[in-house]
Image (spheres, grey):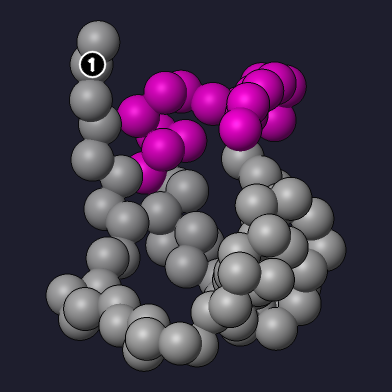
Amino acid sequence: MEQYDIGYPHSNSKRIVKRGVRTIQNRKKAFQLGYDYYDGSRENGYGGYNYDGRWLKIIPSVIRRYGLTNDTTVLEIGCKKGL
């Protein structure tokens, strides 16, 4: 399988969730991968994640790499919310 580094901007900082912030109820909501996980409070998952435009810098290199055109169809399986 060929790997292609798209240049996704990863953060070098550690993600720290303080002990006791997420209760068992928060974890149950997160496990459902529904509204509460993606758009609810931060304690339940992503916490209202909004697209910040980072793909606008990356997509042109993916288009060139794979020769995509306006007629190209792409199927993304497992993209969760699809942003």
Residue 51 picture location, percent across and down: 63, 71
Screen quadrant of the C terminus: bottom right
The picture quadrant where one finds residue 79 is: top right
| Percent coordinates x, y for residue 81 in the rendering | 71, 51
- Residue drawn at x 65%, y 52% as measured from the top left: 31
Amino acid at the residue labelled 1? Glu
Q: Is residue 73 left or right of residue 20?
A: right
Q: What residue appears at the point 47 percent right and 68 percent down from the top-left corner?
A: 54
In this view, the residue farthest toward the right is: 35
- Residue lying at 35% horizontally and 29% vertically, measured from the top left: 65
**Residue located at (41% from left, 38% from top):** 62
Magenta residues: mostly which secondary structure? Answer: loop
On screen, residue 36 versus residue 72, left or right, reads: right
Compared across the picture, whether 60 is left or right of 6 comes to right
Number of residue marks:
1
- Residue 15 is situated, as x and y percent measured from the top left of the image, at 30, 78
Note whether residue 59 is visible: yes
Position of the N terminus by quadrant: top left
Identify the residue under disc 1.
2
> Which corner quadrant of the image does residue 6 belong to?
top left
Identify which residue, 25 or 42, lies in the foreground.
Answer: 25
Vertical side of 37 occupied by 72: above or below: above
Q: Is residue 62 left or right of residue 78?
A: left
Residue range in magenta is 61-78
Tell me where residue 26 appears, x and y as whole percent.
65, 72
| Residue 19 within the segment the image draws in magenta | no
Residue reaching furthest top? 1
Q: Judge whether 10 appears above or below 68 on screen.
A: below
